[in-house]
Amino acid sequence: MASDPTVLVMVLAGGEGKRLLPLTNDRAKPAVPFGGAYRIIDFAVSNFANAGYLKVVVLTQYKSHSLDRHISQTWRFSTMLDDYVTTVPAQMRRGPQWFQGSADAIYQNLNLIYDERPDVVCVFGADHIYRMDPRQMVDEHRGSGAGVTVAAIPVPRADAHQFGIIEAADDGRIVAFHEKPADPPAMPGDPDRCLASMGNYVFDTQTLIDVVTPNSENPLVDMGGDVIPELTRQGVARVYDFSTNRVPGQDSRERGYWRDVGTIDAYYDANMDLIDPVPVFNLYNQRWPVYTHRKALPPAKVSRGIEGEPAVVDGSLLCQGSVVSGAHVERSIISPAVFIDHDAHVTESIVMEGVHVGAGARLHRCIIDKNVVIPPGERIGLDHDLDRQRYTVSDSGIVVVEKERSFG
């Protein structure tokens, strides 16, 4: 390339996240904590920060206060260089209505594109866990002359009904796009997998403006359901093979790692990926770090209990400010400012910020949301029939205790 392109990043963070209830009772899906120290949105924005794409707008809508606060506290670039990450709520600039879909969200905020006048616009989702160097996708997009380039990854055919499914020619041109099809087409020569859109797009700026601007005959409101099929019909959509993306410091096991954490079970499994002895997704890659807000908390502490009981911690993540006092913690993620009292057992669980686990409690395969006080001796995750009467229990048996739950 003769020169580097000017790039505007638009992160779509306005979805309701109904499938993650009750974790989204009080927050937007991208603001849900992940991996103890992070929020889900940190992974997408960190990719752009590491790539040097530093003009980022985050389009929000539902229950956005927690997300707005996290972005304002965490994501600050150099104002001297006119770089920024900023949240943009639904402003109703086009009339008294909320965003009708992801494409409508872009249309209602075209002023952001007109202000920056970028060469290309990256439109990425806010709610997936992965590492990616978006520069490589932008370079391929510009080299191909496409109107839009769609990042894609193979998924099991049994799960493909949850995604936009791509049929592509050998030259990378998308020939058909099916949004969440009931009978998804398999990849050529691979009947058990389908090629799924990751919800990450690189657009030629004028192509994006033209396609999201509605006309009276065919208003386009959703990226996957409307925009990509329309650009496919126009013959200007191409696919980007995410498996070819290379990130500094990343080993071969992590290449192609991408998780949609849209359900409780998917969210739980992606968290558990972090604590394997050799994790398939490595948080400790300092050449392509995941950034987040760090509170002024002391180091994690592991100590004997008040009666001298030894603490046991194995295969777990302990965040700053957490205290394990004579308790047993195994294959779990312990978030900041968590206190686990003596003789408590926490196994295969995710414990979020500010939780107090009482003495002698037992938690197994649980997600405990923020600021919950678990009473001494409480049992959660050991009797699903009883748990279903009190909590949310996922299809695979993960028990979720909602934020600030009171135990009367």
Image (spheres, grey):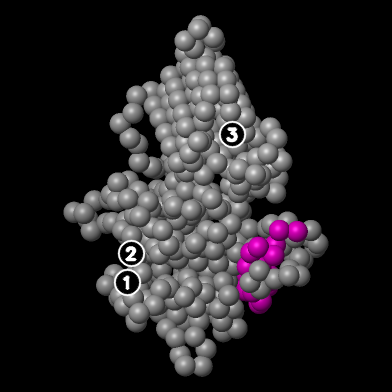
Q: Which residue lies furthest to the top in this view?
A: 308
Query: According to the image, label 2 marks what residue?
Result: 88
Quick check: can you spot residue 45? yes
Q: Give the range drawn in magenta.
A: 158-177
Residue 53 located left or right of residue 395? left
* Above or below, 359 relative to 199: above
Rounded to the nearest whole Å, what is the CA distance between mark 3 and mark 2? 34 Å
Q: What residue type is labelled 2?
A: Val
Q: Do the residues labelled 2 and 1 touch (CB within 8 Å)?
A: yes
Foreground disc of the pair 2, 1: 1
Density class for disc 1 (Cα within 10 Å; few <14, some 14-19, many ≥20) is: some
Density class for disc 2 (Cα within 10 Å; few <14, some 14-19, many ≥20) is: some
* Above or below, 165 relative to 270: below
Residue at screen point 73% across, 56% down: 156
Density class for disc 3 (Cα within 10 Å; few <14, some 14-19, many ≥20) is: many
Query: According to the image, label 1 marks what residue?
Result: 91
Task: Work out whether residue 192 or residue 26 is closer to the camera in this orientation and state it.
Answer: 26
Task: Work out whether residue 311 or residue 88 is closer to the camera in this orientation and state it.
Answer: 311
Q: Residue furthest front?
A: 408
Mark 3 or mark 1: which comes first in sequence? 1
Residue 226 located left or right of residue 395? left
